[in-house]
Image (cartoon, helix red, strand yellow):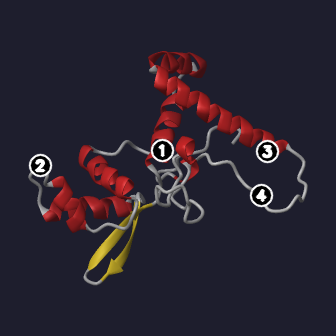
């Protein structure tokens, strides 16, 4: 089960997720220094800790490491929500209370997500027929799995993770 990131870990991961490319400690440091006074060694230690915990992978680039995220922020958030929901003694009541706290925009996003899940369920249960090349619907805005540029083209399969791949053992929702 994933544990919630600490404040500085979250600040570092936010940058790694937003930039969606390999980053160095120096790049993260310079951006963090816009908001706070922080030492290079502090950021280096946090990024090393995130690597050891499985949140980022790293590759040597000269005398430095370049870090990339293992999972997406959406997958991290989903794993935290799943963890909170699964610890409730009354999951249905917890969901009702949670939905009651949502804004209209959040409820609309939830409805969009449910449509994607229902469509995926229908596709999973449909008989398999060979009709040629498949064209999958574009669900990147709902699922948060887009890894390409913002031009609408995708550079390949998403390898940044799903809720099942969140460090710390986050699991897919039941039945998925």
Q: Is residue 146 left or right of residue 41?
A: right
Residue at x 36%, y 63% (from the top left corner): 51
- Mark nearest the camera among 3 and 2 is 3
Q: Please tell me whether residue 33 is drawn above or below residue 62 in the rendered image.
A: above
**What distance separates the C-alpha of mark 4 from that of mark 3?**
12 Å
| Callout 4–callout 1 Cβ contact below 8 Å | no
Q: CA distance from mark 2 to mark 1?
A: 26 Å
Which residue occupies the foreground of this view, 134 or 75?
134
The residue at the point 25 percent across, 82 percent down is 63
> Distance between the Cα atoms at labels 4 and 1?
26 Å
Q: Quadrant of the C terminus?
A: top right
Dot 4 falls on a residue whose secondary structure is loop
Badge 2, how many Cα within 10 Å: few under 14, some, many 20+? few
Q: Position of residue 83 (x, y in %)?
A: 50, 36
Residue indicated by mark 4: 134
Going from N to C along the chain, the mark reached first, 4 or 2, is 2
What SS does tag 3 mark?
helix
**Residue beneath disc 2:** 36
Classify residue 96 by image quadrant: top right
Q: Is residue 174 visible?
A: no
Circle 3 residue: 123
The first of marks 3 and 2 along the sequence is 2
Q: Closer to the observer: label 4 or label 1?
A: 4
- Relative height, residue 122 to residue 8 (above, below): above
Label ID, residue 136? none
x%, y% of residue 165? 54, 54
Residue under pointer 1: 74
The residue at 61%/45% (across/down) is: 139
The one nearer the camera, 75 or 154, is 154
């Amino acid at each position: 089960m994933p544990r919630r990131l600490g404040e500085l870990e979250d600040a570092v991961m936010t940058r790694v997720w937003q930039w969606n490319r390999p980053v160095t400690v120096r790049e993260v440091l310079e951006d963090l220094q816009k908001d706070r006074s922080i030492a290079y060694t502090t950021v280096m230690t946090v990024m090393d800790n995130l690597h050891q915990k499985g949140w980022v992978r790293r590759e040597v680039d000269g005398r430095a490491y370049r870090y990339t995220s293992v999972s997406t922020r959406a997958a991290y958030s989903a794993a935290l929500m799943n963890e909170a929901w699964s610890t409730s003694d009354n999951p249905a009541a917890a969901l009702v209370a949670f939905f009651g706290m949502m804004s209209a925009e959040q409820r609309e996003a939830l409805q969009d997500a449910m449509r994607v899940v229902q469509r995926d369920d229908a596709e999973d249960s449909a008989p398999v027929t060979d009709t040629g090349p498949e064209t999958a619907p574009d669900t990147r805005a709902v699922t948060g799995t887009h890894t390409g540029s913002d031009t609408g083209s995708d550079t390949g399969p998403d390898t940044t993770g799903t809720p099942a791949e969140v460090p710390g053992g986050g699991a897919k929702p039941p039945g998925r």
